[in-house]
Amino acid sequence: MSGRVYLIGAGPGAPDLLTLRAVGILRRADVVFHDALVHTETLALAAGAEKIPVGKRSGRRSTAQKFINKRLIDAARRHAVVVRLKGGDPMLFGRAQEEIDALRRAGVDFEIVPGVTAASAAAAELGVSLTRRGLSRHVVFVTPRAAEGERGNDWATSVLAADTAVLYMGAGLADAISTELIGRGKPADTPIALVENASLPGRRVLFGTLTELPALAQATKGGPTLVLFGEVLRSALELQHRPASAEDIEDLLKRA
């Protein structure tokens, strides 16, 4: 094996949130296997590379993971710089371990390049820290989704135990999430926020409470959406429910 495989985090979407290391490797890449939601400007950095889509989207036909593993190994036999470009950070809900294990078994050299995960981008969009002294010392990242054949995913226990929680790939299961959490004792007025297309020009933020989650999820437009829960969102939620002040309007005009 002469080539090296780089598992690179493409971040939440905006190309200028890539790390400098990621940019340098993309510019040297011979072939790039990329997720479905990677920005076109990010892919354009790999100007001399063959670009192969292998993305997975919930509820749609997608490339089998075993096939992706095989293609990475085969590509490393032919090319010096092979990139597996993943949305967000490769090590969070990116199935990176399956690819790492396959590369190790095949004796393929690899390197992991971290990226900005969507939860960090969502918190930045909200202007709300996920941790706060005296209020939130415990943050969890969870997904309610489980692949076919996987053991049961008790995501709700983690959410109930945490001060702040971020759900990945959860908007499509909003009814079940709201029912499950309220049924297990989480207050119906728990503040929540939905952040769609975090870091991109078309981003949207919706605030509400846990009982309003299904209606808020229906108001999204199909982009990747994170759901955030916790008292750290209380002040932001209350701000949405009071009349805008002159200072608020001035701030909005500055951001426009």
Image (cartoon, rainbow, N blue to C red):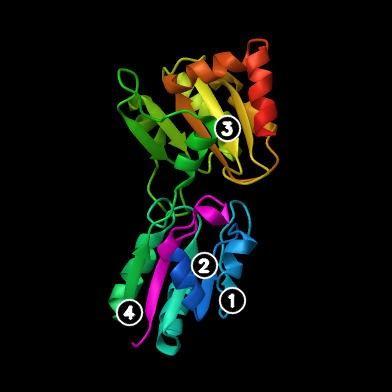
Disc nearer the start of the sequence (1/4): 1
Q: Are marks 4 and 3 in contact (CB under 8 Å)?
A: no
Q: Nearer the viewer, mark 3 or mark 2?
A: 3
Disc nearer the start of the sequence (4/3): 4
Q: Secondary structure at mark 3?
A: strand
- Where is mark 4, residue-wise? 108
Quarter where residue 221 is shown:
top right
Q: Secondary structure at mark 1?
A: loop
Q: Residues within 10 Å of mark 4 (few under 14, many from 20)?
A: some
Q: Are marks 1 and 4 in contact (CB under 8 Å)?
A: no
- In front: 79, or 148? 79
| Residue found at x 63% / y 56% | 60
The kind of residue on which mark 4 rests is Val
In the image, is 154 to the left or to the right of 44? Answer: left
x then y, percent, for residue 234: 49, 17
Q: Nearer the viewer, mark 1 or mark 4?
A: 1
Residue 243 appearing in the image: yes
As for residue 120 lying within the magenta part, the answer is: no
- Where is mark 2, residue-wise? 64
| The residue stretch that appears in magenta | 1-21
Quarter where residue 52 is shown:
bottom right
**Distance of mark 1 from mark 3, alpha carbons?**
35 Å
Disc nearer the start of the sequence (3/2): 2
